[in-house]
Image (tube, rainbow, N blue to C red):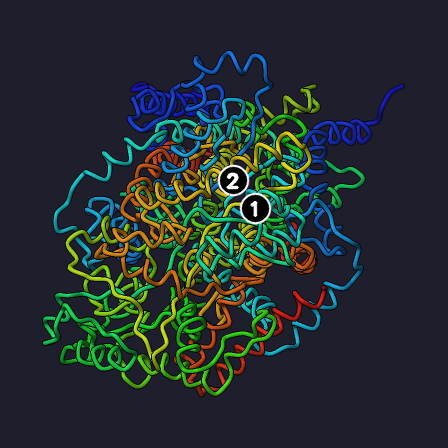
């Protein structure tokens, strides 16, 4: 791991020198302005997040007071939430479902997006619009038929529920659209050259085209993971009981008819955001200036 | 590189989750993971050994019972189920209470075409007509649940469960509204904290006296906050309108009548707290309920279920509960309840139906009601248990219990829409500066349209 | 039999698309068509089925659209306003931030995490936090305004400001998404184009106008189309942020999907809800096709 990181850093450094000849000289006025503006924006972006963390440190009676900082900060909420029946299980469930879905989405969406961009065939427009069309129906209208299907196929009980929770999202139109747009930047000549060399179509996609859209794949993986992580209504409908709830569904246990234990929700939400930030931190590094270019040169 | 990274993240996340999952969860029932339904029926399994003999001769009937998740209710029902199964070894009740309150109806709706779902179900009484309309509920058998029994033994508000000449559901417990008052704030304002307002006029005066503002005119203490979206739309309909000499609806609840002169007077009384007296603003301090919990409101109309919230969120609040203020010598309160019905799924099989009826009888008995008061803090639905002197003398629950004999439950056909018209009427007065009478007329017209649409089909 | 190159391509295209197409037909289109069918029926959601009523629900919606104070009318109108305010803000801010991030060399990861933080925060937490920030008198924003001597604002409590206030939260939450996609798009633009143009003496604005913007076209198309669809489907945020989740005050924040949900599950009127869904579907479809036609440009490298 250490070696790999070092290699990567060297590449990155080399890349900077090659690709940004005008900018290596230090702070220009334009980048100074960028730092200032970005910092101001960043404060606005993270304040609510910080407030969530601060709220999770408040004992319940402080929830009806209106102070920004907790007066008697406590980890009690964390202890209580972690002790809540099944919290660890909900965490595990969320991870299993997000992994099933993201693995499948990255593969199928990238393949379909590539095909819809790089191939000419009858029905192409229709298939594309037909896929996009699935984004135009609110999920709330689909949960009843999905549930009926799941019961028919036995996906509503036992371990099959993981598949039951994941199946509506194992291929996504938004992801296919994203990949279709990004494959636009991959030169056709490159693919044709590979065909002349006798490479298989699948091989061309896998080893030529795919590496060139790595930033987009990283973005797709991030967004899909997060989207699944936060999904609420469908996992709630399909899961037979608390054992199979995902985190957001489990969070609903702190919301009642007449009261909501916001401090617990904030605690659980803070805990829930940790894996997301981890996933983000890892994948966002794939979105690095010059990678696509390096690929092209090679 | 990408792949190796990916696997690394997955591995780390999975390990973290497994560690978390492996932590013993104190409140976790059972412990096996394979069959969640079996777990929920844990009480049945634990008592199994003694019952093996009869079970072998007689087939065990399994029925499913659903309610929304609320810890105290779930525990109380678990106890009732345990007692019931001890009496009826050939019936097993599967208790599904993992459904959040807000999505309870969604979950049931999804279960209908799939042919699964509960045999006995707990629902808000205001939803009942729509469920009957869909053919989802079946009438309770006349011989086991005679209507006369309801009229004689249950709080009068439970008559909202009778529709079309039949009884459709029965509750274990009911709720009423009462007046919460903050003793410290009253004392601060020079009022006697032990004598809360007893009439509407007193409420007005005391609310004004209790209100405090800072130099800029910001509220420090709000005397009384009107928030129709909370309980005040009920308070208006079933309490104020009657007290001012009107009637909220015709007796059969098909005709809106609160737009009468008396109704308008009651409405003006309600909105005056916001517009003329300026004793509070529902948009401050996150709504009237939270503001009361925060110790920033003197008087607050709310239900018995709020006692639990206060115990949890504002344990140090020095408050009392009194009956709702009377007016013109008229006492009234709004009553509501979560009620239990039998579904058509149960009715499809005579054996299940028989078991469901037995179970329903058990959970609506006076004994069940008494257990419910202890466990959940709601009032028993049966008059006998509700007039228990000990309950009436309770410093907090007593005021609610005394309301049982004069409580009215509105017969809703579409509870959320009927509430919305009054929320909008209030907002029209406050935010759109509409004349209160005009705003109420619009509300009456819109609510009448909702009622007409429902009754038009019949 | 030997296939021509083109025929082989067609065959491979179908092979690659077989599983996704099958998936969309069974899992997405079949339930969608069921919903379309329900829109012609009088279906209480707790029934297994309901009687055919033809275009009755569509007629009702048509009537509602001309009624004052109608929730349906407000819903359509508001939904369009969400798109008009939300999509351009998200695109312009997203692009500006991505360009700035692309320009700087230090603390890049830190900034990315900061701008991405809202996106990883769960929806209920976001709604809670913003409701608190927006509180009159006690909320952080109003306290800052007071400290600066500015008048307090009601934000979500006022019919005039509520929709804009909720849109701001939506933009805030989705900005990270736009930024990351833009960043990924910027990575695809070969640096040599810029170098060549610089040698020709191009100004930064010319670089942006003639290289960055045209080469970002696929990304802009994507973000516009997807952003429009998601704002047209606005639901969870309004449900969590408006008073009692009803799209108030005075219907000023309600959306079509919120009305679908309320009609379908609170008022048990699934037929009407399905008809609303169909109309929304057609509206989104039309807008999407128009956007794809007019925004997409073929870029010659």
The residue singled out by tag 2 in the image is: B360
What chain letter is assigned to the residue under label 2? B
Task: Please tell me whether residue A54 is drawn above or below residue B33 in the rendered image.
Answer: below
Asked whether A3 or B401 is in front, the reply is B401
SS under mark 2: helix
SS under mark 1: loop
Asked whether C69 or C179 is in front, the reply is C69
Q: Of label 1 and label 2, which has the lower sequence position?
A: 1
Quarter placement of the N terminus of chain B:
top left
Task: Please tell me whether residue B445 is drawn above or below residue A220 in the rendered image.
Answer: below
Q: Position of residue B418 (x, y in %)?
A: 52, 67
Task: Please tell me whether residue A209 is drawn above or below residue C192 in the rendered image.
Answer: above
Q: Evaluate whether label 1 is on the same chain as label 2.
A: yes
Task: Sort mark 2 into few (<14), some (14-19) or many (20+) by Cα contacts within 10 Å.
Answer: many
Q: Position of residue C179 (x, y in %)?
A: 43, 49
Judge from the rendering whether residue B433 lies leftward or rightward of residue B282; answer left or right: right
- Label number found at residue B145: 1
Farthest-out residue, right = C1
Q: Residue at x 15, y 65 (%)?
A: B183
Residue B397 in view in this figure? yes
Q: Position of residue A267 (x, y in %)?
A: 28, 41
Q: Label 1 vs label 2: CA separation?
A: 10 Å
């Amino acid at each position: 791991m250490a070696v790999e990181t070092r290699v990567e850093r060297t590449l990155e450094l080399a890349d900077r020198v090659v690709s940004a000849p005008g900018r290596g000289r230090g702070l220009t006025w334009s980048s100074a302005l960028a730092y200032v503006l970005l910092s101001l924006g960043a404060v606005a972006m993270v304040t609510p997040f910080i407030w969530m963390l601060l709220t999770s440190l408040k004992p319940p009676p402080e929830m009806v007071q209106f102070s920004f900082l907790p007066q008697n900060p406590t980890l009690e909420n964390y202890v209580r939430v972690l002790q809540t029946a099944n919290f660890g299980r909900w965490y595990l469930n969320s991870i299993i479902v997000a992994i099933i879905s993201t693995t499948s989405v990255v593969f199928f969406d990238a393949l379909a997006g590539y095909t819809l961009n790089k191939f000419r065939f009858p029905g192409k427009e229709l298939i594309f619009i037909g896929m996009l069309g699935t984004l135009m129906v609110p999920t709330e209208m689909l949960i009843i038929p999905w549930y009926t299907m799941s019961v028919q196929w036995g996906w509503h009980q036992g371990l099959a529920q993981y598949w039951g929770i994941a199946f509506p999202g194992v291929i996504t139109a938004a992801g296919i659209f994203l990949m279709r747009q990004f494959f636009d930047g991959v030169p056709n000549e490159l693919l044709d050259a590979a065909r002349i060399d006798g490479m298989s179509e699948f091989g061309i996609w896998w080893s030529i085209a795919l590496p060139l859209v790595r930033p987009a794949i990283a973005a797709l993986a991030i967004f899909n993971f997060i989207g699944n992580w936060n999904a609420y209504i469908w996992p709630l409908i399909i899961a037979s009981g608390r054992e199979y709830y995902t985190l957001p569904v489990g969070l609903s246990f702190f919301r009642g008819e007449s009261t909501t234990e916001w401090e617990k929700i904030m605690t659980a939400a803070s805990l829930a955001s940790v894996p997301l930030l981890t996933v983000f931190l890892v994948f966002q590094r794939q979105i690095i200036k010059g990678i696509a270019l390096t690929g092209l040169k090679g | 590189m990408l792949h190796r990274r990916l696997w690394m993240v997955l591995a780390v996340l999975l390990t973290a989750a497994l560690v978390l999952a492996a932590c013993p969860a104190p409140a976790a029932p059972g412990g096996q993971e394979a069959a969640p339904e079996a777990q929920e029926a844990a009480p049945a399994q634990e008592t199994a050994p003694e019952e093996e003999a009869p079970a072998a001769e007689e087939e065990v009937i399994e029925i499913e019972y659903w309610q929304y998740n609320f810890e105290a209710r779930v525990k109380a029902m678990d106890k009732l189920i345990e007692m019931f199964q001890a009496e009826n070894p050939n019936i097993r009740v599967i208790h599904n209470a993992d459904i959040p309150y807000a999505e309870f109806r969604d979950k049931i709706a999804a279960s209908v075409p799939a042919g699964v779902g509960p045999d006995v179900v707990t629902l808000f009484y205001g939803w009942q007509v729509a469920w009957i309309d869909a053919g989802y509920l079946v009438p309770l058998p006349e011989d086991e649940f005679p209507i006369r029994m309801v009229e004689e033994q249950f709080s009068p508000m439970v008559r909202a469960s009778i529709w079309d000449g039949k009884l459709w559901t029965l509750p274990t417990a009911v709720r009423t509204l009462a007046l919460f008052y903050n003793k410290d704030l009253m004392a601060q304002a020079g009022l006697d904290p032990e004598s809360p307002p007893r009439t509407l006029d007193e409420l007005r005066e005391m609310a004004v006296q209790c209100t405090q503002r800072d130099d800029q005119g910001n509220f420090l203490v709000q005397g009384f906050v009107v928030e129709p979206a909370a309980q005040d739309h009920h308070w208006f309909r079933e309490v104020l309108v009657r007290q001012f000499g009107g009637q909220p609806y015709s007796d059969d609840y098909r005709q809106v009548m609160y737009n009468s002169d008396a109704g308008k007077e009651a409405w003006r009384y309600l909105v005056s707290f916001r517009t003329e007296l300026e004793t509070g603003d529902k948009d401050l301090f996150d709504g009237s309920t939270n503001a009361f919990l925060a110790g920033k409101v003197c008087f607050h109309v709310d239900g018995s279920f709020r006692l639990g919230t206060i115990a949890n969120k504002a344990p140090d609040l020095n408050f009392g509960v009194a009956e709702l203020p009377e007016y013109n010598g008229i006492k009234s309160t709004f009553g509501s309840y979560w009620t239990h019905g039998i579904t058509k799924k149960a009715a499809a099989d005579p054996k299940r139906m028989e078991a469901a009826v037995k179970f329903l009888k058990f959970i609506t008995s006076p004994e069940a009601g008494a257990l419910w008061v202890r466990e959940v803090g709601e009032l028993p639905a049966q008059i006998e248990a509700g007039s228990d002197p000990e309950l009436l003398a309770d410093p907090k629950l007593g005021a609610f219990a005394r309301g049982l004999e004069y409580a009215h439950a509105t017969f809703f056909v579409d509870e959320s829409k009927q509430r919305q018209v009054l929320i909008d009427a209030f907002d029209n007065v406050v935010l759109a500066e509409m004349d209160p009478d005009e705003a109420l007329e619009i509300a009456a017209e819109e609510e009448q349209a909702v009622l007409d649409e429902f009754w038009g089909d019949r | 039999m030997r296939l021509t190159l083109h025929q082989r391509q067609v065959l491979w295209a179908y092979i690659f698309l077989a599983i996704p197409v099958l998936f969309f037909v069974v899992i997405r289109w079949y339930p969608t068509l069921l919903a379309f069918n329900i829109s012609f029926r009088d279906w209480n959601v707790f029934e297994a089925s309901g009687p055919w009523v033809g275009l009755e629900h569509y007629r009702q919606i048509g009537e509602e659209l001309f009624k004052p104070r109608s929730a349906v009318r407000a819903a359509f109108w508001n939904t369009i306003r969400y798109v008009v305010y939300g999509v351009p803000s998200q695109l312009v801010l997203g692009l500006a931030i991505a360009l700035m991030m692309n320009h700087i060399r230090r603390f890049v990861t830190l900034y990315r995490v900061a701008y991405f933080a809202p996106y990883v925060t769960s929806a209920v937490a976001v709604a809670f936090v913003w409701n608190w920030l927006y509180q009159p008198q006690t909320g952080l924003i109003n306290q800052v305004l007071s400290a600066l001597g500015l008048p307090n604002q009601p934000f979500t409590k006022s019919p005039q400001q509520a929709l804009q206030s909720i849109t701001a939260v939506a933009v805030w939450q989705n900005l990270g998404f736009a930024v990351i996609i833009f960043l990924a798009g910027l990575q695809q633009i070969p640096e040599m184009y810029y170098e060549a143009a610089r040698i020709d003496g191009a100004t930064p604005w010319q670089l942006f106008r003639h290289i960055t913007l045209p080469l970002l076209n696929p990304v802009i198309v994507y973000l516009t189309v997807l952003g429009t669809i998601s704002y047209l489907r606005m639901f969870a945020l309004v449900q969590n942020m408006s008073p009692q989740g009803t799209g108030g005050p005075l219907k000023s924040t309600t959306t079509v999907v919120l009305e679908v949900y309320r009609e379908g599950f609170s008022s048990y009127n699934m037929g009407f809800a399905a008809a609303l869904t169909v109309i929304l579907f057609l509206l989104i479809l039309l807008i999407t096709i128009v956007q794809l036609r007019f925004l997409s440009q073929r870029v010659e490298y």
